[in-house]
């Protein structure tokens, strides 16, 4: 039986607390599009994407109207394109242009999968794709790229990390006339997951079905609102319980939307990713949740502990609400996309070092951080290596999405607009890690990798 109080509560969450479905993402396998002729392969890719995702946007808009639930983004993820390049050879930029054309045709916001998995070394197509990333992201609007450089099982590929430091910088330089937007569409992973619906890191894993529909639900404003109504003397375990119950309600809504969208599109239902993904909008901030818990400002001592509790409670509530919770699920801490994080960074309370500590207990890692334009590629590589080490040793997904603000220095700002937001240029350590980065090779897998 429908409970009127539950209905009214959900309406309030949507209208006043920024509750939304952040994305419905269709994952499409392109393995059957491989061809020794790259032009024929691109034709197959375009045809499959525009056929499978033809009604994705229309379906999302129908469900929005039916339930009154905002679905902010409609997206596509595809098989790592390096696998197609390994068969076809040729210029990987052709695939990027094809993906961009298909994404525009079906009307989605982003398409992810210009990707390679190189945690243990480079196979056919991997190096070619990585070398093509700066040009591919500069010449496309909707294409996102991700590279997995490490895992708990394989260790860390330091040759790949050295290369990615260079490519992040080159990508920013090629798009410096557009706020260095290319680097905002490029993420470097350790322990990347195959069913992530969020950009820029989404790709369709080889273990997935041919076509699936997943959803990412977000509600930091809802969680903050619940905590703001709790008494000051509420204990931490009481706060954790309130977050867990709220996450349960949010996930149930996401399950309803994703399952219905999958059925309407005639594809398999994949997963619900319950990640508290913030936006620059007032009242939609993970940092403000942490401050509601009791911190004067995000970045103060105690931030990592509060974030650990938040992340754990979100996961527990989500798992109770759906048997198909996946992706990353937890709390994201992208600086430029979170009003509270932006304020803390501007005030100097939040540093990259503190953010790195926070990534040990949250979803993903150093995300949407603007760094000085003169930051060397070796320093960028070292930032990636540090974050990959946290992921490897802790058996969790970590990632780095930093944007070198070409021509800007500490204290200035980049403004990407929309969900990507804006961010202050944050300081980095200037001491050189070049000798370490240039050694190359691999950091061996940790002892905890020996699980079987």
Image (cartoon, rainbow, N blue to C red):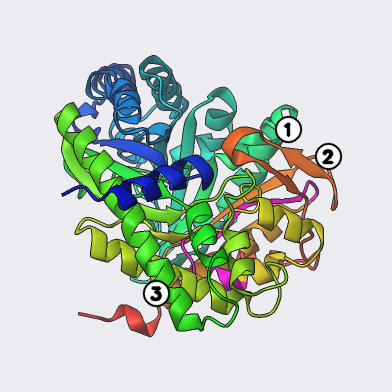
Give the mark nearest the N terminus, 3 or 1: 1
Residue contact at pointers 1 and 2, CB within 8 angstroms: yes
From the viewer's perspective, tell me whether residue 196 is left or right of residue 208.
right
Mark 2 secondary-structure assignment: loop
Spot occupied by residue 192 in the image (x, y as percentages of width and height)? 38, 57
Q: Which residues are magenta?
A: 357-374
Q: Quadrant of the C terminus?
A: bottom left
| Residue 366 colored in magenta in the image | yes
| Residue 403 colored in magenta in the image | no
* Pointer 1 local density, CA inside 10 Å: few below 14, some 14–19, many at least 20: some
**Residue 325 can be seen in this image:** yes
Give the mark nearest the N terminus, 2 or 3: 3
Q: Which residue is mark 1?
A: 176
Q: Which residue is mark 3?
A: 241
| Numbered mark located on residue 394 in the image | none
Q: Is residue 185 above or below residue 433?
A: above
Residue under the image location 79 percent in, 68 percent down: 431
Q: Which residue is mark 2?
A: 407
Spot occupied by residue 278 in the image (x, y as percentages of width and height)? 55, 50
């Amino acid at each position: 039986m429908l409970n009127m109080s539950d209905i009214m509560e959900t309406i309030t969450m949507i209208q006043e607390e920024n509750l939304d479905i952040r994305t419905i993402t269709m994952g499409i396998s392109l393995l059957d599009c491989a061809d020794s002729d790259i032009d024929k392969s691109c034709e197959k890719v375009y045809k499959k994407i525009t056929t499978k995702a033809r009604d994705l946007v229309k379906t999302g808009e129908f469900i929005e109207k039916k339930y009154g639930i905002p679905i902010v983004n409609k997206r596509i993820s595809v098989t790592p394109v390096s696998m197609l390049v390994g068969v076809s050879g040729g210029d990987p930029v052709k695939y990027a242009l094809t993906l961009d054309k298909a994404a525009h045709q079906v009307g989605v916001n982003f398409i992810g999968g210009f990707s390679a998995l190189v945690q243990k070394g480079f196979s056919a197509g991997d190096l070619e794709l990585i070398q093509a990333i700066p040009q591919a992201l500069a010449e496309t609007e909707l294409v996102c790229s991700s590279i997995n450089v490490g895992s708990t099982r394989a260790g860390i590929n330091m040759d790949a990390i050295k290369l990615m430091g260079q490519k992040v910088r080159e990508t920013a330089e090629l798009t410096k006339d557009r706020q260095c937007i290319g680097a905002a569409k490029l993420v470097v992973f350790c322990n990347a997951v195959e069913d992530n619906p969020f950009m820029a890191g989404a790709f369709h894993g080889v273990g997935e079905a041919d076509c699936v529909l997943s959803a990412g639900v977000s509600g930091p404003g809802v969680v903050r609102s619940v905590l703001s109504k709790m008494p000051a003397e509420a204990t931490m375990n009481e706060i954790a319980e309130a977050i867990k119950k709220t996450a349960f309600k949010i996930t149930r809504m996401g399950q309803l939307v994703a399952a219905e969208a999958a059925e309407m599109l005639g594809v398999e239902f994949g997963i619900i990713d319950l990640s508290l993904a913030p936006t620059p909008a007032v009242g939609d901030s993970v940092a403000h949740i942490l401050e509601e818990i009791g911190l004067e400002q995000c970045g103060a001592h105690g931030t990592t502990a509060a974030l650990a509790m938040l992340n754990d409670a979100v996961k527990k509530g989500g798992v109770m609400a759906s048997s198909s919770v996946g992706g990353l699920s937890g709390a994201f801490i992208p600086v430029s996309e979170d009003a509270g994080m932006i304020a803390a960074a501007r005030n100097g309370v939040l540093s990259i070092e503190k953010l790195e500590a926070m990534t040990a207990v949250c979803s993903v890692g150093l995300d949407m951080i603007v760094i000085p334009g003169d930051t060397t590629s070796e320093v960028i590589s070292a930032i990636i290596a540090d974050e990959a080490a946290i992921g490897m040793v802790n058996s969790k997904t970590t990632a780095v999405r930093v944007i070198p603000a070409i021509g800007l220095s500490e204290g200035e700002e980049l403004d990407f607009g929309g969900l990507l937001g804006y961010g202050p240029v944050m300081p980095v350590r200037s001491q050189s890690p070049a000798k370490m980065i240039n050694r190359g090779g691999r950091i061996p897998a940790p002892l905890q990798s020996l699980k079987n």
